Image: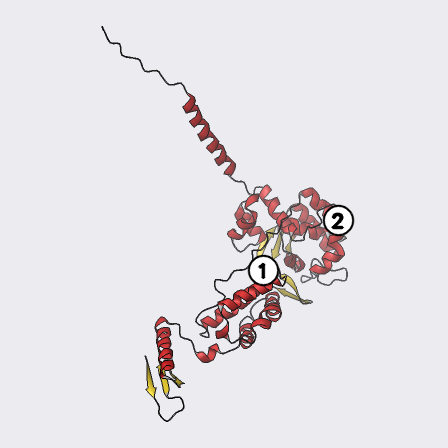
Amino acid sequence: MAHIEKRPDRPKLWRVRYRDPSGRERSKSFARKVDADRFMATIQADLIRGEWTDPRLSRTTLAEWSQRWMVTKSHLKPKTLAGYRSNLNAHVLPTFGDYQLRHIDRMAVEEWLADLQASGLGPSGVRQARQALNAMLTLAVDAGYLNANPVDGTSTPRLPNAEMLFLDADQIDRLAGTIQEPYGTLVYVLAYGGLRWGEAAALRRKRCDLARSRIDVAESLADVGGHLYFGSTKNHRSRIVAIPGFLRDLLDQHLARHIPNDPEALVFTTPAGAPLRNSNFRRQAWYQAVESAGLPEGLRIHDLRHTCASLLASAGATPKAVQLHLGHSSITVTMDRYTHLFPSDVDDLVRRLDDIRTRNLAAQTRPRERTRGIELGGR
């Protein structure tokens, strides 16, 4: 597989020659035979284990590799791409940009993650930075630039569980009644239709099938670095959402009063007819409406989606029905978030455990029958 040859006419006397997995012959020269022996043993072991990598590739710097890696991500949504670029520029490249891939080891990654936390970066930011580095080095392994990913096995701080707030029907009415016109209908679409903000902001007239009380959710609007992008939904799947009769009537009135008779027209826009931006909407309409309605200060727009799940569960919907209504990618996502909303047989099981112990105690305290003695005649 590999052998050493002596070349008396060269400054580096000993040359190791071997063939890589593709059959290409390679070599490396050394001044001392002991170094050549050590290198040959390492190369042979790597080839046998299938862990050999081209040393020229592993000398690529992370900055160079990141540019090639980003090209492979061109299919991702603009918001996802912007997130990767932001993490690379802010957290990954300042530390590892000049490193050759082969010099990024587990300890360096662990120290980097610790420094990010010490700098005050929150758990979510640390996890996203790690994800970017991990994705790049995973591809480096797959492409033969590395034989192992040093990010594997490293850990990040746990994300705090964001508290979900659920509104009841009365609170939804108060919020819709206090928010500035014409956004009361938007509140009901979010709370009873369960649409994500981007899905509601991208909803078009042609996708409102009011004759069947249905909304076709097939598009989403993202605000990335001040630029708006229309694209597919979060999981790249469209869905048909059934809406209650009162919301159908509200949407019908909203379309007639506020929206041009154009199939491509957006259903919810700014007063000037421009697409809605989440940040502007919160600042100009949402916060004031929440306060005026007497609702919790921390109520988020996304909590209306949680509210929809709660309303569906209280109406007797199955977890599968909730998954389809909200457009979750799997039933696991639905149950992970909303298990507590669905009827449980835990209370019944606990009552049965009580019954078991009660019967056991009753059996212990029941008077036992006395055994009749045997009479012996005479003395």
Residue at x 40% of width, y 85% of height: 29
Give the alpha-carbon distance from disc 2 to disc 1, as whole Å.
30 Å
**Dot 2 amino acid type:** Glu
Find residue 115 and report its horizontal and vertical position in percent: 59, 65
Q: Nearer the viewer, mark 2 or mark 1?
A: 2
**Which one is in front, 161 or 300?**
161
Residue at x 50% of width, y 62% of height: 154
Residue at x 52% of width, y 54% of height: 330
Mark 2 and 1 residues: CB-CB less than 8 Å, in contact? no
Q: Is residue 250 visible?
A: yes
Mark 2, Cα crowd under 10 Å, few <14 / some 14-19 / many 20+, is: some
Reading the image, the residue beneath label 1 is 234
Q: Is residue 206 above or below residue 68?
A: above
Reading the image, the residue beneath label 2 is 291
**Dot 1 amino acid type:** Lys
Find residue 9 and report its horizontal and vertical position in percent: 37, 94
Q: Is residue 233 above or below residue 370?
A: below
Left or right: where 19 falls relative to 264: left
Q: Is residue 36 above or below residue 325?
A: below
**Which one is in front, 107 or 121?**
107
**Which one is in front, 92 or 179?**
92
Find residue 306 and report its horizontal and vertical position in percent: 62, 49
Numbered mark located on residue 295 in the image: none
